[in-house]
Amino acid sequence: MLTNKTVLVVDDIDTMRRVIVSQLDRFRPKQVLTATNGAEALRIIAKQHVDLILSDWNMPEMNGLELLTALRGQPRLRALPFILVTAETERERVAKAIAAGVTDLLVKPYAPDVLATRIERAFRREAGHRGETSASAPANAPVKPRGKPGTPTLLIVDDTPDNLFLLSQMFKDDYTVRVANNGEKALQICCSDDPPDLVLLDVMMPGMDGFEVATRMRQHPAAEAIPVIFVTAMDGNDARVRGLELGAVDFVNKPVDPNILKPRVRNFLRYVSLRKGLQADYDAMIETARLREDVERITRHDLRGPLAGIVGLAQSIREQDAVPREELDDRMRAIEESALRVLDMLNLSAEIYKIETGAYRLDAKPVGLDGILKRIAELAQAAHREKEITVRYTSTGSNATGDALLCHSLFHNLVRNACEASPTGGEVSITVADSDPLRIAITNRGAVAQEIRDHFFDKFVTHGKAGGSGVGTYSARLLAEAQNGSIALDVDDSDDRTTITVSLPRA
């Protein structure tokens, strides 16, 4: 994942920097650099190439958001993967980081496996921004949750076996309970890949006492934000003040009263649940912003070609005194085809966004595929006349159930891609199987490259197509699935052919 990559870790706390560097070492990076604040990070980046930045938010002199803003102001660094580590709970401030171009947000506390997932996401997003092939999971793949799904984990720490038994029995029916009989074991659990959600921590223990455990927890990214409730026989004010300074959320005196402790644990675990929701909330905010950017960028990219074609054809007709009727018809068909491509993109930009965000609602109606596919075949053949492509359509007269606009855009996109992939003089066939569901197969000569077959319908996957955005087949999958259909790829290497089959409900 980080082989041959240079990572810059930015954090003002020395212990935290060393822990993060240790976590990164398992991914075998080429080099890990460190900085104590954003200003120092800028000086390092000015002198040395960096592939990824992992930065804390709150730092003196220049914080993480200010560093991000400074980097995004430099054209060569606008796509540099930047993960901002935060305990921030104000949505307005998080929205500013997203607007500034943060690649990902990592909410404290986090475990090393979560860090690994975020790093993978960051590099996928960078590849997508550059329009490169992505051969891994989609960028919005969910992050594996910590612990048992839906069940908070409670760590009980006490050197007395009777106390461990009493407290574990008190909570075993409501939570996943783990126990530790000394501070060293407790710290190991808290700083592991699967830390607890709340710690009930005895203060007076031999060796490492509770205060030392809490102090060292605050120096590790997986444990620094875990709530701690001190359970102690100490009742002096000095001990309480020290515990609060170490980040304790509450004190409970021994002997424990279940009627007091159980509601307190339940209340603090509600807070933990809300904090866990922050990561999902921030992920959704980032994905929404990225979807908008994708739609805008792809639309700008894809509009240039057909608009330039319309302008060029119109100019050629105007500048030529007399155009033979057959040639004029061809040019007018090419103009129509280009105009339809523009119209498709404008109409679909909002629909694709709705589909990706789950906001699209299908108003299913009978769709006459015969008329749509016949016209698409005619326009595609005219548009690729110079390649001498033959587009053949076999009609069955069957109707599908779906949305006519989505169907037109879906098949127009796939047929155009098939024509572009075909060799000169090749043939593209469109056939409809009279079945339930209907199966519309588009076949062209030329086998899809082996390295992208497993991810052919993923976002930003492209191969051997200069200027390709890698969203054509991805959007085709979305359009098919939005109409309760499906899409599949079949490659025949022996015959050097590729077939894409779309299944749609029969009317």
Image (spheres, grey):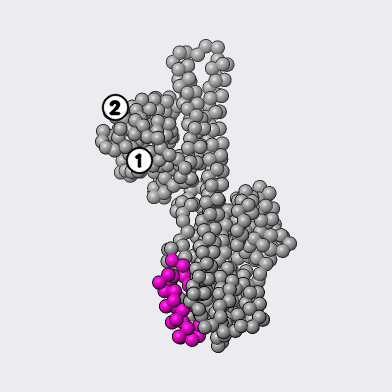
Query: Which element type, helix, strand or loop, lies under badge 2?
Result: loop
Residue 435 part of the magenta segment: no
Which image quarter holds the C terminus? top left
Residue at 44% across, 70% down? 175
Determine which residue is flagged by label 2. Answer: 397
Residue at 58%, 76% in the rendered image:
251
User: Is disc 1 in contact with disc 2, using a CB cutoff of under 8 Å?
Assistant: no
Residue range highlighted in magenta: 151-177
Whether 167 is among the magenta residues is yes
**Mark 1 crowd level (few <14, some 14–19, many ≥20, 10 Å Cα):** some
Q: Residue 67 vs residue 392: left or right?
A: right
Of callouts 1 and 2, the N-terminal one: 2
| x then y, percent, for residue 111 | 52, 67
Examine the image and state in which quarter residue 366 appears.
top left
Residue 327 lies, in percent from the top left, at 46, 17
Q: What label does residue 485 carry, if any?
A: 1
Residue 137's label in the rendered image is none
- Horizontal side of 381 relative to 83 (left or right) equals left
Compared to residue 285, the image places residue 226 above or below, namely below
Residue type at mark 2?
A: Gly
Image vertical order of residue 222 relative to residue 470, above or below: below
Residue closest to the far left: 435
Which residue type does callout 1 highlight?
Gly
In the rendered image, the vertical position of residue 418 relative to residue 72, given as above or below = above
